[in-house]
Amino acid sequence: MASNFPAAYHSSSMASAVLLLLGLLMASLGIKGVQSIGVCYGMLGNNLPPAREVVALYKSRKINRMRIYDPNQATLQALRGSNIELMLGVPNSDLQALANNPSNAKSWVQRNVKNYSPGVRFRYIAVGNEVGATSQLAKFVLPAMRNVQNAVNSFGLQNQVKVSTAIDMIVMGNSYPPSQGAFRADARGHLDPIIRFLVNNKSPLLANIYTYFSYAGNPKDITLPYALFTSPGVVVRDGARSYQNLFDAMLDALYSALERAGGGALNVVVSESGWPSAGAVGATVGNAGTYYKNFIKHVPGGTPKRPKKAIESYLFAMFDENQKQPELEKHFGLFSPNKQPKYPLSFGESREGIWDVSSSNYSHGVAGSLRSDI
């Protein structure tokens, strides 16, 4: 039958139908969509490539997000026009100056953010990294965040860049089972006002989450497969929720702790996660490769507490850094300093399924009651 509709209509209509069918097929097969994984770019090495080569490596490997720990000017220059989204760190050493004087914060934002925007796509400013509640710097974190936020607002960048801070899991007082997650009592005075700040500004909490350190600190109760996403079945049951990997248990425990502290509405960005390839117990190339690949595949699917909600995450780290201490800290790189990949990772796509670089090395026994706290 002849049609009165123009050919262009048939073309676009057919394309829409194909896309719809493809989407339904992917959903029925459990295939997840493309998810951008960031990578932390640490610079504590005397043999690392120049910033412009690092940015080119990010682009060639389809790594679309980067975290840096201080406003390295060469890196900021190299990022211009790259379309890589950036998490920029305020070093802990700058916290006091930015907290005590709003003009210092404004100058910092002017120099390191405003002067590079919009050529550099700033996503977050991480004001401090792993500042403990008992640290002498703890009292400066929130005032520095406020002053940086006010500076960001003054330049009209508040809808482009979010201000937060990065915590580690040492702040957890309880994380087992995940539904009973709670912050340490001595950390609440430090964290609660920060959580209120994040809620008020609709900013996420940044959290460095390492299953490696939980496993290495308690190998009796935490099995290697549970930490590497390779457990063959459920390890921890928590009410209606089941946990087959330690990462989900740790992140859900953090979500529970946030709920108890008035931050139930907050999103968590995993600002670091990784596994060393040498230097300590369980630190092998095989284990590290397994962790990184399975992590990339897993995070688009969320956690049992927040299913189907992709977890924005940053792997630690881009390169091995030979000037770090202790020894295992030198071996978290996805790439060697000569830019050669250590593992066969793909950052451009994520799919269901678990990858094990050497399954014969793993015990398939699962402890009956595993703890996910540090």
Image: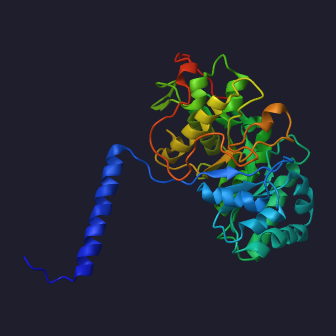
Is any part of residue 324 visible from this angle?
yes
Apparent side of residue 315 relative to residue 109 in the rendered image (left or right): left
Question: Where 81 falls versus 295 (above or below)?
Answer: below
Apparent side of residue 30 relative to residue 238 in the rendered image (left or right): left
Q: Quadrant of residue 372?
A: top right
Apparent side of residue 348 relative to residue 371 in the rendered image (left or right): left
Q: Nearer the viewer, residue 100 or 262?
A: 100
Which residue is outermost to the left? 1
**Residue 358 spot, x, y in % from top left:** 56, 26
Q: Nearer the viewer, residue 351 or 217?
A: 351
The residue that appears at 28% across and 57% down in the rendered structure is 21
Q: Quadrant of residue 273?
A: top right
Where the C terminus falls, by quadrant? top right
Which colouring convention does the figure follow?
Answer: rainbow
Is any part of residue 125 visible from this angle?
no
Q: Nearer the viewer, residue 120 or 301?
A: 120
Tally the numbered discs.
Answer: 0
Where the N terminus falls, by quadrant? bottom left
**Residue 293 spot, x, y in % from top left:** 57, 39
The residue that appears at 77% across and 76% down in the rendered structure is 154
Question: Where 224 falls versus 198 (above or below)?
Answer: above
**Residue 336 spot, x, y in % from top left:** 73, 43
The residue that appears at 78% across and 28% down in the rendered structure is 279
**Residue 232 spot, x, y in % from top left:** 47, 24
Question: Where 270 falls versus 118 (above or below)?
Answer: above
